[in-house]
Structure formats: C-alpha cells, structure tokens
Amino acid sequence: MWNFRLLDVQDAALFLTVTFYVFRLAGAISIHSPQRSLTRSVQDDVLFSVDVTCRGIPTIQWTFMSGVVSRSIGTWQPGVYANITEDYVDRVQPYTNGSMGLSLLRLQDAGFYVVTVTETTGNSKDAGFVLKVNEVIYEDLQYLSVSALVLACLVGLGMLAMWLLDKAYRRILAWKQQRANRCRTREQENEATELQPL
Ligand SMILES: *[C@@H]1O[C@H](CO)[C@@H](O)[C@H](O)[C@H]1NC(C)=O
Ligand SMILES: *[C@@H]1O[C@H](CO)[C@@H](O)[C@H](O)[C@H]1NC(C)=O
C-alpha cells in the first residue's frame, strides 16, 4: 500500500516535470521572421521583420553585434513604452509586432542584430539577423572614373580625326594650288610659243 502510494507521488512528479519541460520547449514565445539575412546599400532603409507572439505583453529588445562591439539599440513593450538608445533614436522605428526599421544605413551598420523577446513570466527567446551593407558610393566613383576614361578616349579620337581631316584638307589645298600653278605656267608657255613666230 505504502509502496503503491510512493509510486503514485513519483509518477505525479514525473508527470509534472515532463509537462513543465514540454511547456517550456513548446514555448509560449514564437518569433516568426521571413528573412534572416539581408543585404542593403549605404543610405538604404532596412526592416528587420518579425512577428512575435507570446502570453501577455512581450518586452522586445534589439541588440547590435559586430566583432567585439555589442550595443543595445532599444527596448520596447508594444503600446506601453519605447526606449531607443540615443545613437539610434533618429533612425530606428519600433513596430508592435517586434519588427525594427533602421533607416539611412551606414557601412558601420553591417553585422548581427539580435532580438530578445521576454515574457512577463521571465521566459525569453532570441532570434538573430545578419545585415550586409554595400558601398554604393565607391561603386559610383568607379563607374564615374570609367566613364571619364571612355569620354577622354572619345575626345582623343575626335581630336585625332580633326587633325587628320585638317591635314588632308591642307594637302588638297596644296595640290589644287600646284595644279593651278602648273596650268598657269603652261598657259604662259603657250603664250610664249604663240608669240614666237611674230
Ligand atoms: C510587422 O509589422 C510591419 C509593420 O506593420 C510589417 O511591415 C511586417 O511585415 C510585419 N512582419 C511580419 C513578419 O509580419
Ligand atoms: C532606456 O535605456 C537606457 C539604457 O538601455 C536606460 O539607462 C534608461 O534608464 C532607459 N530609460 C527608460 C525610461 O526606461
């Protein structure tokens, strides 16, 4: 009888433990995100899109990490408060579903972004994003320098063509002059021969 009851208590404890773990694993928090890896250009905007669901009002915290740098971007509770770090306050847009918009991207914004969702019970869950920022200005400059080179070549070719045309024109002029001179001398000779018999 006593043994049986002990087993009962153990079973109940086991049942509770399993339930507790299943509950934890199943997680009341869910972070759904369509895309975890994003590439943008300097000056672009980016939306780290997530849809957070949990029991009660979640606390959303976004953190930036790059190399040894790790800094808090902001913390908010939808409809309650939003506390955006001073460095980001002009560029960050917090959303109710947990998403974060970051505008006017700089090269230094490239790195990892982690969202931490915390329930009122203290349970929390993370999701990470990777952001790549391309140097568009540098590419533009490269494009410009290539264009300038092509333009310089075209101008050079144009000048060469003009020089050649000018040379050809002078040759034609000289040739015409020569012919005119030759005609004139021949006429003079003719005149001379005509005059001879007289
Ligand atoms: C979260 O909300 C923003 C703004 O309303 C929306 O653009 C975005 O698509 C939402 N994200 C998800 C994953 O639903
Ligand atoms: C906002 O966050 C900063 C740093 O994360 C903290 O020092 C400050 O107390 C917070 N302000 C409010 C109103 O929660």
Image: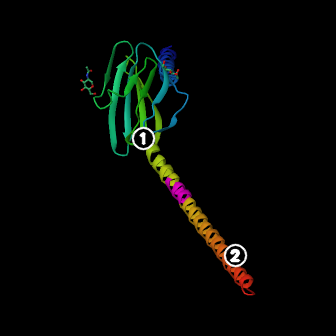
Label 2 or label 1, whichever lies nearer to me, is: 2
- The count of marks equals 2
Looking at the picture, tell me which residue is in the foreground, 51 or 4.
Answer: 51
Q: Is mark 2 within 8 Å of ligand 1?
A: no
Q: Position of residue 151 (x, y in %)?
A: 53, 54
> 12 above or below 110?
above
Q: Quadrant of ligand 2?
A: top left
The disc at residue 183 is: 2
Q: What residue type is labelled 2?
A: Cys
Q: Position of residue 91 (x, y in %)?
A: 36, 28
- Residue at image coords 34%, 30%: 73
What's the magenta bit mostly, secondary-structure-wise? helix
Looking at the picture, tell me which residue is in the foreground, 160 or 9.
Answer: 160
Looking at the picture, tell me which residue is in the foreground, 9 or 71.
Answer: 71
> 170 above or below 31?
below
Label 2: state its secondary structure. Answer: helix
Which region is colored magenta? 148-155
Return the residue at label 1.
110
- Residue at image coords 74%, 82%: 194
Dot 2: few (<14), some (14–19), or many (≥20) neighbours within 10 Å? few
Residue 35 in which image quadrant: top right
